Image (cartoon, rainbow, N blue to C red):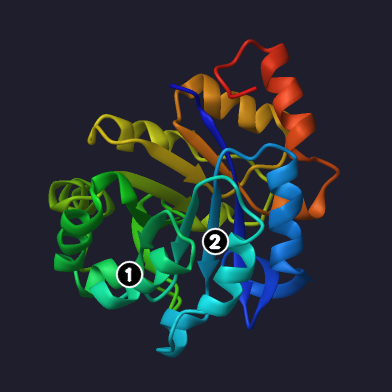
């Protein structure tokens, strides 16, 4: 099975935005235009996160999701305030191929199983936003409050959501998000031995070497945000390099 290369798009008020460590968001363009470019460059999948909906208690931005989906011919995972089976259905009908749950899963863990039963485990992705503190300890992070969650251990939570029906995990290193400082592969290794579902990693990619190391470590997919927005890297260049290293990526 190929290791995937996955652009990650954050949307806010209908625009593509990018920040650092889940703060300081700046406008980075039109989401649909960016999705079209990623599609043309051979992205394996696309992750779209509505960062405002769950924070504001609002309905997901299905209008922008539709515009993005109309430009995509690769699988699309949508995160953002999918807090009911009805919203999951709406997301799928609008163009999502997979439903992503992060903070909603903390509040409504039963929803993981409900959606997995309806759409299959392969269509349910649970996001784990994880912050590494100054002492090197890992904590789940809730972007709505900007605080860590002391009620959940991130590693126990990973096992629980898989048991509940998550078919894939997206592991976000919050302390590295937008920093271009490299992936936290130690965190990946700890997760890998706990669960037997595909793992996507995100947060910190800043160079071709960072991505190459992640693939060599065995990740199922890398999600890229800031590197595609704020550097001269693009998916064609990345894939050419990975193929030159004989890595298992899609042509």
* Mark 1 Cα-neighbour bin, 10 Å: few <14, some 14–19, many ≥20: some
CA distance for labels 2 and 1: 16 Å
2 vs 1, front mark: 1
Q: What x and y, as percent, mark residue 142?
A: 38, 71
Which residue is disc 2 drawn over? Answer: 48
Front-lying residue, 211 or 57: 57
Front-lying residue, 43 or 178: 43
Q: What x and y, as percent, mark residue 21?
A: 58, 64
N-terminal of the pair, mark 2 or mark 1, is 2
Image position of 156 (left or right of 227)? left
Q: Residue at x 48, y 42 (%)?
A: 201
Image position of 188 (left or right of 65)? left
Image position of 28 (left or right of 221)? right
Q: Residue at x 46, y 89 (%)?
A: 56
Residue 193 vertical placement versus 176 (above, below):
above
What mark, if any, has residue 89 been given in the picture? 1
Residue 104 vertical placement versus 37 (above, below):
below
Toward which corner of the image does residue 182 lie, by quadrant? top right
Split into 4 quadrants, where in the image is the N terminus?
A: top left
């Amino acid at each position: 099975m190929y290791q995937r290369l996955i652009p990650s798009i954050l949307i806010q008020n209908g625009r593509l935005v990018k920040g650092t460590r889940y703060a300081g968001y700046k406008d980075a363009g039109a989401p649909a235009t960016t999705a079209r470019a990623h599609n043309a460059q051979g992205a394996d999948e696309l992750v779209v996160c509505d960062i405002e909906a769950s924070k504001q208690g609002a309905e997901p931005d299905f209008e922008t999701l539709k515009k993005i989906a109309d430009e995509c011919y690769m699988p699309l995972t949508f995160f953002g305030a999918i807090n009911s089976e009805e919203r999951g259905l709406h997301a799928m009908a609008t163009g999502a191929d997979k439903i992503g749950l992060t903070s909603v899963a903390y509040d409504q863990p039963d929803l993981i199983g409900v959606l997995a039963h309806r759409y299959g485990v392969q269509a349910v992705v649970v996001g784990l936003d994880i912050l590494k503190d100054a002492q090197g300890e890992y904590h789940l992070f809730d972007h709505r409050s900007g605080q860590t969650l002391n009620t959940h251990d991130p590693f126990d939570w990973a096992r629980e959501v898989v048991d509940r029906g998550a078919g894939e995990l997206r592991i976000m290193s919050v302390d590295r998000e937008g920093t271009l400082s490299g992936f936290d592969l130690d965190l990946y290794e700890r997760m890998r031995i706990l669960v037997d579902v595909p793992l996507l990693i995100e947060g910190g990619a800043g160079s071709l070497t960072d991505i190459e190391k992640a693939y060599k470590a065995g990740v199922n997919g890398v999600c890229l945000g800031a590197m595609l927005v704020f550097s001269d890297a693009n998916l064609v260049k990345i894939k050419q390099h990975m193929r030159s290293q004989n890595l298992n990526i899609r042509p």
